[in-house]
Image: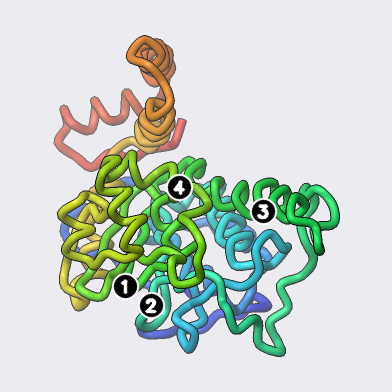
Amino acid sequence: MVYQNRGRKSSTRGAQSRRIPGNHRIPSMARKKVRSMATPDLVPWLLYEPEPENGILWIKFNRPDRMNATLGSAQERSTASKVVDYMRHGDDDPDVRAIILTGVGRGFCAGNDSKGPKEDEDFGDFLPGNRGNFEGNPDGQRQSFYHGYTKIIREISQIRKPTIAMMNGPAAGSGMDMAVQCDIRIGCESTQFITYHARGQIIENGGAYFLPRIVGLARALEFAYVGQIDANLAYQWGLLNHLVASTELEQFTRDLCQRIMRVSPISQWINKRVIRASLDSTLEGVMAMTSSAATIIHLTEDKDEARNASIEKRPPVYKGR
């Protein structure tokens, strides 16, 4: 199912609703029929494509003629704002178990569009919280960037459900930053990670935080110095979880989603929060978090359903509670 601007539906080859292959029924939230959640306010430069029968929400950068370069920063309809808005809707939708961020065409996301918007691309006014006028004021620009754009992109890492960056091509600047905020990255031979070194800028928007935690300090610094790494090196470093042929990229991602959906969503949500919090915690702190979380999970219906399904040798039907 494809949602276009103004909520119209259409079919495209890349977005047709398809059941995940295999003999297993997809474990998902228990429901008598597929329910449709209200769609977010849509923009043409970012596609919102839910597949409720498969449990997947596709979010696609949609400016292929500019390698999916982003529009704006912290405006109401900027690319980053809408990525977070779409993900929040997916987080609230009981029919969504996994959220996939990818690009239309040859690129994943080329970062900020140095050419600026096209005539019909209006991404609105700044959202509240940008901390005042920044024109001609360097500190105002800093405050606006920190309190606006960086905090928006940070919210990708705080989405409750599993997020996957399916990297069909280069990811530059903020495109790279959004990819590393996702839980999992799957790449192909066309995948590249590129900083804003060509513009004399630095790694921003959480990239400087997540990169050394994903690949290690020395490799993160090497990347910062050279400004670009290809798919093979990214996979060797662990920046890509998986590296597959471009012709197999979508199916591999769908198969991974099928495996994800066989596990209790509550376990996944709590595991994600604890593991991410552990990056800035201590052993004692993590042990305290897991002790509390284990007690909560023990009281859920999904814990009993997982056990019963295993004993009865059937696919579990989770309720998310």
Q: Is residue 299 visible?
A: no
The picture places residue 153, in percent across and down from the top left corner, at 56, 52
- Contact? badges 3 and 1 (CB < 8 Å): no
Structural distance between the alpha carbons of marks 3 and 2:
25 Å
Residue count near mark 4 (Cα–Cα under 10 Å), binned few <14, some 14–19, many ≥20: few
Q: Amino acid at mark 2?
A: Gly
The picture places residue 200, in percent across and down from the top left corner, at 50, 66
Residue tagged by mark 4? 31
Residue tagged by mark 3? 145
Q: Amino acid at mark 1?
A: Asn
Q: Residue at x 56, y 77 (%)?
A: 113
Q: Which numbered mark, 4 or 3, is in the foreground of this view?
A: 3
Q: Nearer the viewer, residue 95 or 165?
A: 165
Q: Nearer the viewer, residue 186 or 237?
A: 237
Looking at marks 1 and 4 on the same chain, the residue that comes earlier in the sequence is marked by 4
**The quadrant where residue 161 appears:** top left
The picture places residue 183, in percent across and down from the top left corner, at 36, 47
Element on which disc 1 rests = loop
Residue tagged by mark 2? 107
The numbered disc on residue 157 is none
The numbered disc on residue 168 is 1
The picture places residue 41, in percent across and down from the top left corner, at 68, 66
Q: Residue at x 46, y 71 (%)?
A: 60
Element on which disc 3 rests = helix
Residue count near mark 1 (Cα–Cα under 10 Å), binned few <14, some 14–19, many ≥20: many
